[in-house]
Amino acid sequence: MSKEEAISLVTDGDLLTVGGVSFHRVPMELIREVIRQGKKKLRLVDREPAIGFDLLIGADAVRSVRFAMLGFELFGFALNFRAAAETGKIEIVEDTCGAVLNGLRAAAAGIPFVPIRGMVGSDLLKIGIQNGNYKVTKDPFTDEDIVAVKAIEPDVALIHVQRADVYGNIQIWGGRFEDVWKAKAAKKVIVSAEEIIDHEAIRHEPYKTTLPYPYVEAVVHLPTGAYPTSCYGLYDADYEHVRDYVQAVRDGRFQEYLQIYVFTKRGDMNARS
């Protein structure tokens, strides 16, 4: 379906997660469409987001964000996120990589929680208990203190992939990160794909299928749909674009950036050139 039809499946207030990590294979064009459609009060969750979440926060689409690290790596802070957090405009739930991943993993497996060890003694444990995301319990075999991380069940997962067929069988090349857990944990999965391939190609090489069609709600054909982040095997991240984005936010020109790269639909690689 079209990206407009696909993103219409996202509703205000949804718990939303996205595929990829940091500046790599993030579903940026789907995120831009979320902004174009004026979605509001979204609750975001991810392990290591960057420009995708910062863009949504700056566009006033976000109510809360649960994260382990939200930053721009070598470019420093995620400035829209930082400003919104410091002013109380959004609710922040600081977490750990292991807790976020295992919360998604629990939901993907259809179980209520996953036990982990690493957070015992951390102040983040106190935060998670206050938010209702963790409970300290006993290992029934050893009587050791362990942390039960509650399953994270997103309403929607947005994922960008290299290839898919029209039925929603998808292929991800290179690092898959935690995309499969996110997809299996979510109630709806919206996929953008660089290429739509014939179903017979999927049947011929089924072992290349990263995620089969029963998990996928919608497929959108979006070449360069991860831009300005990378898509392994096809294009690298455009770090000059990222640098320009950071500078625009720093200089108070974020609305200008939105107008150019989101609302005039110039966010893709081909249009920028």
Image: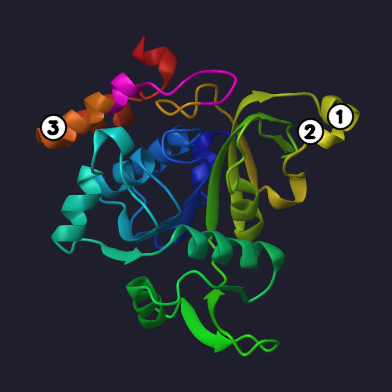
Kind of residue at disc 1: Glu
- Residue 195: x and y in percent read 65, 23
- Residue 189: x and y in percent read 61, 49
- Between 66 and 252, the one lying in front of the other is 66
Bounds of the magenta span? 231-242
Q: Which residue is mark 3?
A: 253
Kind of residue at disc 3: Arg
Label 3 packing within 10 angstroms: few (<14), some (14-19), many (20+): few
- Give the quadrant of residue 207: top right
Mark with earlier residue (2, 3) = 2
Prevailing SS of the magenta stretch: loop
Cα distance in 3D space between marks 3 and 1: 48 Å
Label 1 packing within 10 angstroms: few (<14), some (14-19), many (20+): few
- Give the quadrant of residue 175: top right
Q: Please tell me whether mark 2 or mark 3 is closer to you in this view.
A: 2
User: Within the magenta stretch, is there residue 241?
Assistant: yes
**Residue 153 visible in the picture:** no
Kind of residue at disc 2: Lys
Q: Is residue 74 above or below residue 140?
A: above
- Residue 237: x and y in percent read 42, 24
Q: Which residue is mark 1?
A: 205
Q: Is residue 163 above or below residue 271?
A: below
Q: Is there a contact, CB below 8 Å, between mark 1 and mark 2?
A: yes
Mark with earlier residue (3, 1) = 1
- Between 272 and 115, the one lying in front of the other is 115
Q: Which residue is mark 2?
A: 208
Disc 3, SS: loop
Colour logic = rainbow
